Amino acid sequence: MLKRTIKSVGDSLRRIQQTRYFSAVPTYFHRDSPENNADTPFQFTPESMETIHKIIAKYPSNYKQSAVIPLLYVAQDQNNNWIPLSAMNEIARIVNINPMRVYEVATFYTMFNREPVGKFHLQVCGTTPCLVRGSDKIIKALEDHLGIHEGDSTPDGLFTITEVECLACCANAPMLQVNNQEVYEDLTPENVIELCHQLQDGSAQVGPQNGRNQSEGEGGRTSLFNPEDIKPVCRDFGQLKAEIEERRRQASQ
């Protein structure tokens, strides 16, 4: 009985060890490095400060902390797609909150990069629809082509591969997003390699990579063949109001 129990536990542990690792879970702690520590110089540019003032003006003066997320985006856009610790401290100073409040936000959301990433940050969706459609093969193809593992950057600083959660393009799975912006869909292990070349030479086309029109079925359109002939139905509320008032007037007589 004891031997069977030990064997069962051992089998369970082996299955756990073989379970696919999802690195999209963020790292919650900070490690000081020469390029990322509290003493690393960081200052918002005049252009960024102008944007920041416009953002903060949208909130009541006693709720400036609500601007933390958009200010993190400003810092990331200014700093080659990543946010150093000193930038978070500067944001805390601007909105007058404890720096820990900024750290909490930056570590919770995976779209904020707290370490340097490549010029092309390849964020591959690994959630269920994309996984069913082969996102793990997309990651493997990128790893083999670029010579790095998921979570790493190429030595030339061009590419970083990261597995992320759902990016809301399930109908065109599998897909990836570049630098929190453009999405590239209907990927295969072959066309994702071609996409890497196109990103480098500036010829990449956003959207499906297999020629389909947006999210139409692969068999093409089956209805709404002439959408330009479909006219929106617009009600004349002024006329409707007049009709209601006339009915009320007649009812009161």
Image (tube, helix red, strand yellow):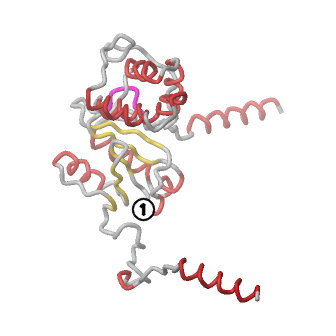
Residue 191: x and y in percent read 29, 57
Q: Going 37% across and 43% down the picture, which residue do you hit?
A: 180
Disc 1 target residue: 172
The secondary structure type at the circle numbered 1 is helix
> Residue drawn at (60%, 78%), measured in percent from left and top?
241
- 74 with respect to 12 (left or right): left
Q: Residue furthest left?
A: 201
Dot 1 amino acid type = Asn
| 90, above or below 253, in the image | above
Q: Residue at x 44, y 58 (%)?
A: 173
Which residue is more in the foreground, 30 or 75? 75
Magenta residues, start to end: 112-117
Give coordinates of residue 130: x percent, y percent.
47, 54
Where does residue 8 sit, x and y in percent of width and height? Answer: 73, 36
Residue 228 to residue 126: above or below: below
**Residue closer to the observer: 79 or 207:** 79
Locate the C terminus by quadrant.
bottom right
Q: Is residue 89 magenta?
A: no
